[in-house]
Image: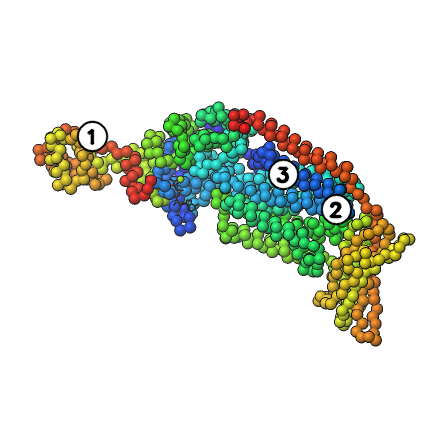
Amino acid sequence: MTNEHKRSEGRPKAGWRIVLRSELSDLWIGGKAIIFLILFSLLLGVMAFLFATNKELSLTPPAEALFLMVKTTLAVGLLFGLVLGADTISGERERTTIESLLLTPVRRRDVVIGKYLAALSPWPAAMAVAGGYLLLIAPDGATFVSAFVWTGFVGTIIVAAFTGFGVLVSVMSATNKASLSTSLLVYILFFVPTQLPGSAQAGVVGELIRRVNPLDAVNQFLDKLLVSNAAFDELVSWLVSPMIMFVLVVLGLGLVAPRALRLDPPGIGALFARGRGAVVLALVMCTIALATASPSQALQESTGQLTIDVDLSSQEVKTGDTINFQTRVTVPEDEIGPWIVAMNIVNLGDGDPVDPEDWSPLRAQTIEQVDASRQAVLEWEVNAIIKGDYLVYMVALASPASAGETSQPVSSQGIHLTVEQFFRINPGGVLPLAIGMPLALSGLLYGVSRARRRTIDSEVMN
Amino acid sequence: MQAGEKVLTATQLGMTYGQRQALRGLSFTLGAGRILGFLGPNGAGKTTAIRILTTIIEPTTGSFSVAGIDSSDPHGIRQRIGVLPESLGFPGRNTALEYLTYFGEHYGRSRTESRDRALSLLSEVGLGGRHSSLIGSYSRGMRQRLGIARTLLGDPQVVFLDEPTLGLDPRGQQELVQIIQRIARERGAGVVFCSHQLAEVESVCDDVIILNEGQVVADGRVEDVTARKGAVRFSVVVDPPYVDEAVRVLQSERFTVSRDPQVDGRIEVELGTEDPDQTLEIRRELLRSLLAAGVDIVAFTNEASRLEEVFLSLTEGVAS
Ligand SMILES: Nc1ncnc2c1ncn2[C@@H]1O[C@H](COP(=O)(O)OP(=O)(O)OP(=O)(O)O)[C@@H](O)[C@H]1O
Ligand SMILES: [Mg+2]
């Protein structure tokens, strides 16, 4: 009777906490997570060192370097989360511990939550490690804070989404091999487009693909935030698809994963038969529809006149920085074209006039075709070569129909560029951190495994 | 728990994997403090039945209740059972003590309570001296013992053991039998236990169910199941000079007979029927014809059959 009493009184309140604690100790005291952090800090250390010392890389503008480091932090953090997530349930199946896991009197949902949170745990630690390197690279305190806070925020969304995706795949897989290869394949599908040069994805379709791909969207968000100082209104729209992916994954973890957590992975068909798959499918469709519908720029109807707009009004940069912007040309209904858009750069201070050829790989572009709303969008790139105060403006004109005719060019609003002298990363400052961080982490690993060894019988340790 | 109270009721359980019917129409009840043995050749459906009853898989047909909890509340059932599953994996990088402490916390115990419980259970199964070794370093039998300790963590009302003696040394097997008896007699839990060790089942179990190709071929109290088969065979001991004559007489009456090579004059006779009334009649006839032929009968006994014989005869044609 006493047993009976104890049981009913002590029903576990939060089973997920017990699962989480055990998983955390496996991950951290077992050493896996710390080893990951050591490798991660080595990678960032090498990057920082190269930015500081390598002749070519040291010309990379700090904003660009900062962004590269942020991008690496995201890619690595997200990969580790995905791999840990992909191991959660299929790993138990493979190690034949699944039956024991299913026998614990903890709700299936709690098992999923505990394991999911544990797989997420390396991310805050990775952010903390990355913080040191970002501080080193960032040109000033404000830039560091903005980079750190925003990377932390959007990184958490995307890492949580991908880790959860890994868990979902794992729940559906019989072996780690199946689970890992599926997860990694999806990761690569998302990751590869982010490595393609921007020009490969120009145009409406290109931009759409970037927006739908949550990984690319997050990168674009941070790129525009850290490198191009874009307006916040424009930035927020890039967070739509990562947010949707996150929400979908969390829904999947809450609704599908606990049911799929069984001895043998359910056939996907079985889930669909229960009607849950249909819900998931519908949500996926909604995502795509929503992400697609998110307006990149308000469409303007043709007004019957040739007009040209730019999506940037002013920017402060350092020498060597790249400035990217778009022009949108609207052409009259009856005009046939083609139209030409040319770039001009005027030095507002004293000093030599600017030769735009030095500043941009492309001075003029031709528009052969316009879309249904009589518009065309072009991508532009300007490199800040010399310190100073400049105005960039764009001119659109229609090609005259014949030798005897002419046309009236129209100009865009100017883009005011303020170019400061390039800040150099101090190599002397990089080394202590690049060496110190991995050493400190290795010390931590050593300490943890020593402490662990003391709680285990010495006879079995070698 | 009252003795005799039903702690497990299964009704028409069936399981189909694709085209294969692994289990059909399994119905039984188990009283508190009783030990039920599941027997059957490989692939008979024992593990399938245990997985269903322990909420690991859902049956295709039928329902059951464990400790008064209906199968529609698997979470509730899991809190009241202890299971040694067939596929017994452990996290190799944990120590036995850590693992049991962790597992015990799921039943709502505090960490220290759970640890104390783990320590006492580990010494109960003979792992007291090795509780802080990594499970990865355990031998097969040690893991099996750890698994048995785990089944008792939650003070279960029903304990399921899928081949618990697998990999245990002779002393371990004996200890296990004692543990199982203690679980039933002292804790008053019902025990379902499946094994290929028939002698063991015969000595420990109160009830037995023999499965063959997913179907129950015999069930009831162990005595009843063996007795039913026991009437099938007699042994007659005649004065040695009369052996040949006795064999000739019996064979002419169409009995299947065999001479015991070890005991001179002992002849075993198969009656070819299980019906108690018929066997009585046949026995009279048999004796009458022997006496009529002038054979001196020294002794005559019903051959008490062992569970093993019952098992082999009921599951014929299938490798065990
Ligand atoms: N997951 C599964 N998928 C398909 N068939 C299965 C599955 N599990 C069991 N079976 C089949 O169900 C039948 C019963 O299997 P089960 O494991 O219950 O036998 P068992 O009586 O425990 O045998 P053993 O004595 O070998 O442990 C077998 O024919 C087996 O092939
Ligand atoms: Mg089995």
Q: Vertically, is A57 above or below B289? A: below
Of discs 2 and 1, which sits in the foreground?
2
Question: Residue A307 location in percent, x, y?
Answer: 80, 64
| Disc 2 to disc 1, C-alpha distance | 96 Å
Q: From the viewer's perspective, is B260 left or right of A102?
A: left
Q: Which mark is residue A36?
A: 3
Quarter-wise, where is residue A18 in the image? top right
Q: What residue type is labelled 1?
A: Gln
Which residue sits at x=81%, y=48%?
A318
Q: Which amino acid does label 3 sit on?
A: Phe
Number of residues whose C-alpha sits closer than 10 Å to that of mark 2, classed few (under 14), some (14–19) or many (20 or more): some
* Chain containing mark 2: A
| Disc 1 to disc 3, C-alpha distance | 73 Å
Rendering quadrant holding ligand 2: top left
Question: Residue B140 location in percent, x, y?
Answer: 44, 32
Q: Which residue was labeled with disc 1?
A: B262
Which residue sits at x=59%, y=41%?
A84
Number of residues whose C-alpha sits closer than 10 Å to that of mark 1, classed few (under 14), some (14–19) or many (20 or more): few
Of discs 3 and 2, which sits in the foreground?
2
Q: Which residue was labeled with disc 2?
A: A57
Q: Nearer the viewer, residue A86 or A164?
A: A86
